[in-house]
Image (cartoon, rainbow, N blue to C red):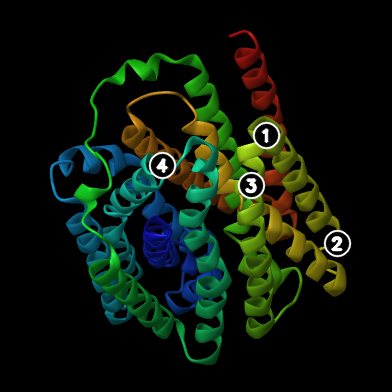
Amino acid sequence: MRFNKTLFILSLGTFGITNTEFSVIGILPDLAKAFNVSISKAGWLLSVFAIIVAVFGPFMMIFLSLINKKKLLVFSLMVFTVSNFLTPLVNQFNYLLFVRMLPAFFHPVYWSIALSIARQNSKKSEVSKNISVIFAGLTIATVMGIPLATLTSSLLNWRFSFIISGLINLISLLGIVVYLPPTNNMGSLKIHYDYQFLKNRILWTNFLLVFLIITAMYTTYGYMADFLKTVSGLSGKQISIMFLIFGITGIFGNKLAGKFMDISPQKTTLYFILALLSTHVLLNYFGIMYIPLVIIILFWGLIHSGGFLISNVVLTSIETENQEMLNTIFTSCGNFAVTAGSIIGGYWIANNGIHNIAWASIIILCLSLIVFRQKLKLTTNL
């Protein structure tokens, strides 16, 4: 019971940092208008954050590995809180990018510690299930954070969206301070420096597969607000409702992904790719029709939400004592993929229009199927 409580506390922190990273997705059109930049340039508010996480993640964990883990969790959330409260004060786009960069350095620190605690204190048969609790924070952030930011920006303005995000991080911080037990009672979280596992060919095949999956996810999803506004013709309030539908179904999708990954990781991964591919095909052809769009959003959220959990299990399934380093590699891989998705999506929009954005994800998902097949060959030959 105590460990379950710890998982939910860590999930609350995950909610806070995820909301900071991804809530801009729902207000990109408003930010582009407020700072007089293109939608593709506004997309850098997501991709710059992700680039920093991807590049500096492993180095931050190595540099800070000797510091008490609970203190690191608290300090990380403090940086996120301060950054969100500073954001409404800026009046130039470059300054906005700079303030967004600050918490990005501590994003991988929080993720790596939280995932390590979940993995190291779980029975082997419950690893995916317990990790899914941590990832539930990410899912709930899409349920509440993104639509809340969209609705707040629509009713008030974009500045209030960041203030609310700052309050969420502050609440998460207080939850960690008050309720999280000392981390030295949860097993060793020391970073190992034996990098021999990096020579594992299956690891790099998994890395490529995860990269393609998450890139495909965010190539379209990163510009979802603009698609719903420009192509589907929805208002700000309607867009926030769509994000809410997306996120609510995502709660169940995240739970299902954890359950099925414990039963059959290979089949679950394959079915996830095929389901996400089908959803994007449907979005491309029926995104302009309101009722079909609602149904597509419902299933899209259900499928999409399991992507990070599935990707984490795929990448960290290698047997090694370097689990913390694997977690930082996953965080870097995921954020490189988010960056790639944002850049590819912005390029695709600039050259082919927002109405064709789903095709970019479709192509990438087809490539992921090819890599998945290669992964099966490698594991079969072991």
Q: CA distance from mark 1 to mark 4?
A: 18 Å
Using the numbered discs, state the Cα–Cα distance from disc 3 to disc 4 in whole angstroms. Answer: 15 Å
Q: Which mark is residue 334?
A: none
Earlier residue among tags 3 and 4: 4
Return the mark for residue 286.
2
Residue 183 appearing in the image: yes
Contact check, label 1 and label 3, Cβ < 8 Å: no
Q: Residues within 10 Å of mark 1 (few under 14, many from 20)?
A: few
Q: In 3D space, how far apart are the residues under numbered discs 1 and 3 (Cα atoms)?
A: 9 Å
Residue 90 seen: no
Residue 289 locus on image (x, y percent): 86, 70
Q: Are marks 3 and 4 in contact (CB under 8 Å)?
A: no
Q: Quadrant of the N terminus?
A: bottom left
Front residue of 281/203: it is 203
- Residue type beneath disc 3: Lys
Q: Position of residue 73 (x, y in %)?
A: 25, 58
Residue that mark 1 sits on: 264
- Viewer-nearest of labels 2 and 3? 3
Question: Label 3: which residue?
Answer: 259
Whether residue 320 sits left or right of residue 125 in the image: it is left
Provide the secondary structure element on which disc 3 rests. Answer: helix
The residue positioned 44% from the left and 15% from the top of the image is 200
Residue type, mark 4 in image: Arg
Residue on which disc 4 sits: 119
